[in-house]
Image (spheres, rainbow, N blue to C red):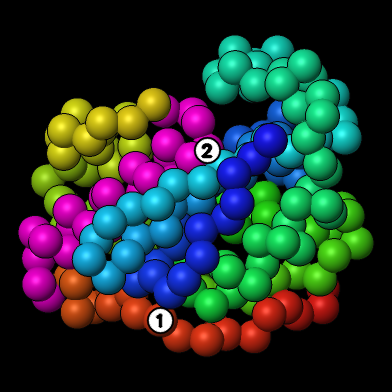
């Protein structure tokens, strides 16, 4: 049984998904990392039944397969409970994949496309550490080494926490960057039609 979603107000929430196959709507795990104003991080994740076949490549990558999600809810059952929390906060993703996957899953399940305020921790990392371009890059695997982050890659909750840590490190490294990418509580509209 999944633990309850974190509750409260946060600086921002990082989100990551894992998918079952090449279809971006095939979300099989969602993870979030809620960053408090004291920079504490509360992580939460849940498995999701993607309602489509798993590809061997994806199973090898994240270790999630049909048996893992056997008793999990599908996206249409999981997402509506998450949306009120997420819609109240700026959202961080590491690349644009997660936003694209959420939108694709909403469309596949006949749900309204969420109107979330997205920021990309890759863009923030590029601004904070331009020297990494051509020197390992700004992916989570390289940032894990450079920033000495401790997380298990390709687990949605862990990757969400890593994206949150990247933003916190970037803000600490550059006050100008922190001001430019200010992540503060800002109410937004819940959803938009496709």
Residue 137 image position (x, y, % from top left): 26, 38
- Residue visible at 72% across and 61% down in the picture: 81
Q: What stretch is highlighted in magenta?
A: 153-176
Looking at the figure, which quarter contains the N terminus? top right
- Based on the picture, tell me whether residue 162 belongs to the magenta stretch: yes
Label 2: element kind: helix
Res. 156 mark:
2
Packing grade of label 1 (10 A; few <14, some 14-19, many >=20) is: some
How many callouts does the rendering have? 2
Q: Mark 1 points at which residue?
A: 185
Residue 163 image position (x, y, % from top left): 36, 48
Looking at the figure, which quarter contains the C terminus? bottom right
Res. 16 mark:
none
Q: Quadrant of residue 168?
A: bottom left
**Is residue 5 found left or right of 89 in the rendered image?**
right
- Based on the picture, tell me whether residue 15 belongs to the magenta stretch: no
Residue 58 image position (x, y, % from top left): 64, 21
Residue 79 image position (x, y, % from top left): 73, 57
């Amino acid at each position: 049984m999944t633990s309850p979603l974190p509750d409260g107000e946060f600086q921002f929430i990082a989100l990551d998904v894992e998918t079952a196959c090449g279809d971006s709507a095939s979300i099989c795990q969602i993870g979030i990392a809620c960053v408090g104003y004291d920079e504490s991080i509360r992580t939460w994740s849940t498995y999701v039944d993607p309602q489509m076949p798993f590809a061997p490549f994806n199973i090898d990558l994240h270790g999630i397969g049909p048996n893992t999600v056997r008793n999990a809810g599908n996206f249409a059952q999981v997402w509506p409970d998450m949306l009120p929390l997420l819609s109240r906060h700026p959202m961080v993703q590491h690349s644009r994949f997660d936003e694209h996957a959420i939108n694709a899953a909403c469309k596949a399940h006949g749900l309204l496309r969420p109107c979330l305020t997205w920021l990309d921790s890759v863009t923030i990392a590029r601004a904070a550490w331009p020297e990494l371009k051509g020197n390992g890059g700004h992916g989570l695997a390289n940032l894990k080494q450079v920033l000495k982050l401790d997380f298990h890659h390709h687990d949605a909750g862990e990757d969400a926490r890593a994206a949150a840590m990247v933003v916190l490190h970037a803000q600490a490294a550059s006050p100008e960057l922190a001001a430019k990418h200010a992540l503060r509580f800002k109410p937004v509209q819940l959803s938009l039609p496709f």
